[in-house]
Image (tube, rainbow, N blue to C red):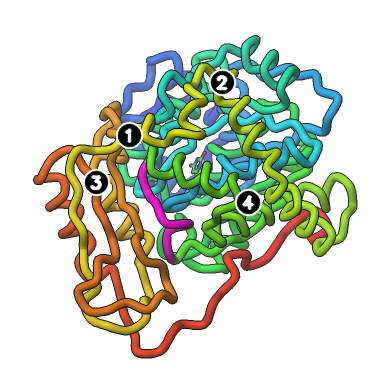
Amino acid sequence: MQGALQLIERKRDGGALTSEEIAALVAGYVAGDVPDYQMSAFLMAATIRGLDFAETVALTDAMLHSGRRLDLQSMRPLVDKHSTGGVGDKASLVAAPLLVTLGFSVPKLSGRGLGHTGGTLDKLESIPGLRTDLSRQEFAAIVGRYGLAIAAQSDEIVPADRLLYALRDVTGTVESLPLIASSIMSKKLAVPSRLIVLDVKVGDGAFFGTQQQAEEFAAMAIALGKAFGRATCAVLTRMDAPLGRTVGNALEVEEAIRCLRGEGPEDLAEVAAALSAQALCAVHGATWEEAVAAAQTALASGEPLERFRFWIKTQGGDARCVDDPALLVRAARSRELPAPRGGYLSRIAARAVGDAARLTGAGRLRKGDAIDHGAGVELLRGVGDEVAQGEPVLRLWAASAERLQAAQERLEGAIAVEELPPSRQSRVVRRMGGDE
Ligand code: URA
């Protein structure tokens, strides 16, 4: 095989790599023989030039085989849910215990914040004591006993994704269909689930700005699943505005708990129910209407909240925060941003809010940066709400005035107000795979 430099140059010039070359590059990176700067160059070449399907399969396979697969026993069908990444996207925190209530087990490997999007692991780690660095044995034991565990990639499980994910986050190489697909699917394939349900976000705050790109991605991920013999389906959901009313780790955990209590917000409950309904359709052959009704009823029953409480405890978290959100950390300083004029809120740009949340300290700007779990952005009003001129619309939380200022500047022009209310749109755009 040629050295890393030749492979980078070939990709830069638009050529294709063989499966063996991709496997060697990934193995070399994980072993420390290929340095960060060469891997960054390869990722940038792949982002600009693309990878064909055979290369994407090879990359997924190489990442999957960089660690060991999980071996799980469960009487219940194993369903894994994953989002392509959004702003304020705490749907996993609601959908996972909801899926357990509906009779599934949910073994899930998650990611950290990536680019302007948040990550489930960072959100979970804002719960005091909660551990996501579970060993394979711990993960299997928790899923077997309680039906639900969410853990990080590790040295044992898809280590290549852990390393590449952190590198992509800080090298402008997140927005690539094949890199996102191989990252997500390598994590999902390491777990022996019966079904993978993807929440493919579309819109300004997602990695796919248009429905066409999101559909292309979903088709690629479904085909990748098929290439590895795994049933995969997707729900495309709108990400033009942040999901729910909070962006930032502890803020989002608190909101997810409220949603599990049946207190909304409506859009978060809608997305969590839709993802769970897709699993009911694919595994049990339910009709979409039946499945959505079953998911909504289960969410309103209060059982998912109890499942959540139990799950937090089994991963070492302080479950008292379910009843007492004051136990969750909150940044020391806050600042409110007003409506530019009176009328109806027609836009709260998700991308700008995601970037601003990152600037408050809720996300990373450099590899290895510590997260401020208490930082972020609260939406005091939502799209469609009537507001008076000067009324506070957003509240920023950060540790310092400098961070608040940087976030405020990024939000310049992010809020639009119109005279007439915008028409209400469902978050669910379309379903792909399964029975559709
Ligand atoms: N989620 C992942 O796990 N990986 C990506 O690359 C994007 C979203």
- Along the viewing direction, whichever of 268 and 352 lies nearer the viewer: 268
Three-letter amino acid code of the residue under disc 4: Ala
Give the x, y percent position of residue 281. Answer: 83, 53
Q: Look at mark 2 in the image and give the residue it sits on.
A: 313
Q: Quadrant of residue 394?
A: bottom left
Q: Earlier in the sequence, mark 3 or mark 4?
A: 4
Question: Spatial distance from mark 2 to mark 4, Cα to Cα?
Answer: 22 Å
Residue type of the residue flagged with mark 3: Trp
Rendered residue at 23%/81% (across/down): 341
Disc 4 is placed on an element classified as helix
Which residue matches tag 3? 397
Residue 147 lies left or right of residue 44; in this view the side is right
Q: Which residue is mark 4?
A: 272
**Circles 2, 4 touching at the beta carbon (< 8 Å):** no
| Residue reaching furthest to the front | 323
Q: Residues within 10 Å of mark 4 (few under 14, many from 20)?
A: many
Mark earlier in primary sequence (2, 4): 4
Residue 313, how many percent across, how many down? 56, 21
Question: Does the magenta run of residues contain 252?
Answer: no
Question: Which residue, given by chain and number where applicable, does mark 1 sit on?
Answer: 373
| Res 142 → quadrant | top right
Observer-side mark, 2 or 1, equals 2
Callout 1: 10 Å neighbours few (<14), some, many (20+)? many
Q: Residue at x 48, y 49 (%)?
A: 89
Whether residue 244 is in magenta: the answer is: yes
Query: From which residue to which does the magenta span run?
Result: 241-248
Residue 103 vertical placement versus 390 (above, below): above
Does any atom of ligand 1 lie closer than 8 Å to the CB of label 2?
Answer: no
